[in-house]
Amino acid sequence: IIGPDDPIGAGGTDAVHRAGAKCFAPTKLCAQLESSKAFTRNLLKKHNIDASPDFLVSTNAQDPQRRFFYDQLQGQIVVKADGLLGGKGVLIAGEHFSSFDAVESFALASIEKFGRVVFEEKLIGQEFSLISIVDGTTVLDTPAIQDHKRAYENDEGPNTGGMGCVSDEHHRLPFLSEYDIAHAHQITDQTMKAIKSETGQAFVGVMYGGFIKTANGVKLIEYNARFGDPEALNILPIMKTDFLEVCQKAVDGRLSDIHHLEFEPVATVVRYLCPKGYPTNAVRNVPITTHFSLPQHKAQEENQQVFYASVAEENGQMILKGSRAIGVLGIGKDLQEAYLNNQALIDKFEGPLFYRKDIGTIELIQSRVDHMNSILN
Ligand code: AMP
Ligand code: GLY
């Protein structure tokens, strides 16, 4: 099983195959789904999968189409460099630029570096992640989740890897219907089949769809070819189906033996404790204290779990290493209970830490529902 995007994108799976073993992760060709935004948009277009915003892939520094596209959408666009830039590859109208000239210099840099740039219509709605396990023929979904990428409360501040994720006891979110999930599932199913016909290879592993529910239905923002972080912390602890068996069936091309993945009927709230100053200017190499004793620093409560990430143990102390430090999971019969369990566990840590207090609150979830309703009306 290969976890992260870099070794997958670099062909780690192909190397495992050459060594004569099976691998739960897509090949390099299939993983272009994550590594190239232009590949994915062109794939959907060619196979008539109606899930993309208006878009333009531009490869030529002199291309007049970029100006036309910008003007046609009155500047309401998103511009994506066509390669991995460590989270700095996407510019959004109104947040990162307000003139064509600013867009153009970024576009030219992307064309120079990666050979192309993608312009897209800016979509308005509520984002959600639907992570599926696939084998090229069958798609099995995990609970739909909402991530919170901005560093600060009310979705302000710089983008991060994800400050926290929520999922309700119906394995959806209050602003999504069963139909929306079925729609996202269908997009993933069609895309999985399109990749096979395009590359001749079955996509085996995780297709993580970043979707957005808009006034015109569910659209695809992007695919990742791996689990989400922190989404996996919501999903895997409540999964009842045996994870290794699912991986085994996937690499054997026999996922259809499993009809659906089973999860406990509970809500989950995950929040990351981060070093003060994260992500731009994080404190590091400073200790934090917990109410758990090292090294068995595991929360034992059934509805609370701790995941240590960017921390190290030095001289019996827990030290911050500068990135998202500790993932904290609260589980409950509904979101309110999951939030309270999360908070109780968060309160057991002390040090130069911060976290997003709004994630998982009824107020924030209600504001998502209100936003969605205002778009649909
Ligand atoms: P990424 O860095 O690729 O994960 O994308 C960052 C974020 O950009 C996404 O999570 C969305 O919030 C936003 N984004 C990307 N494409 C669009 C789009 N077409 N419309 C609106 N927002 C977008
Ligand atoms: N939580 C976002 C990601 O894993 O990309």
Image: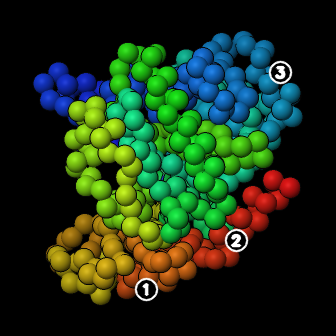
**Residue corresponding to mark 1:** 344
Quarter the N terminus occupies: top left
Viewer-nearest residue: 167 or 283 = 167
Left or right of residue 99, residue 240 in this image? left
What residue is rendered at 60% in x and 76% in y?
361
Using the image, tell me which numbered label, if any, was put on residue 366.
2
Please report whichever mark, 2 or 1, sits nearer to the chain's N-terminal start: 1
Does 43 appear above or below 215?
above
Does 181 appear above or below 220?
below
Q: Is mark 2 within 8 Å of ligand 1?
A: no
What residue is rendered at 83% in x and 32% in y?
73
Left or right of residue 138, residue 145 in this image? right
Secondary element at tag 1: helix
Gap in angstroms between the C-alphas marked 2 and 1: 22 Å
Name which residue type carries label 2.
Gln
* Relative image position of residue 31 (x, y in whole percent): 40, 29
What residue is rendered at 50% in x and 61% in y?
171
* Relative image position of residue 94 (x, y in whole percent): 77, 47
**Residue corresponding to mark 3:** 68
* Relative image position of residue 348 (x, y in whole percent): 37, 85
Task: Examine the rendering and report whether any part of residue 320 can be seen.
Answer: no
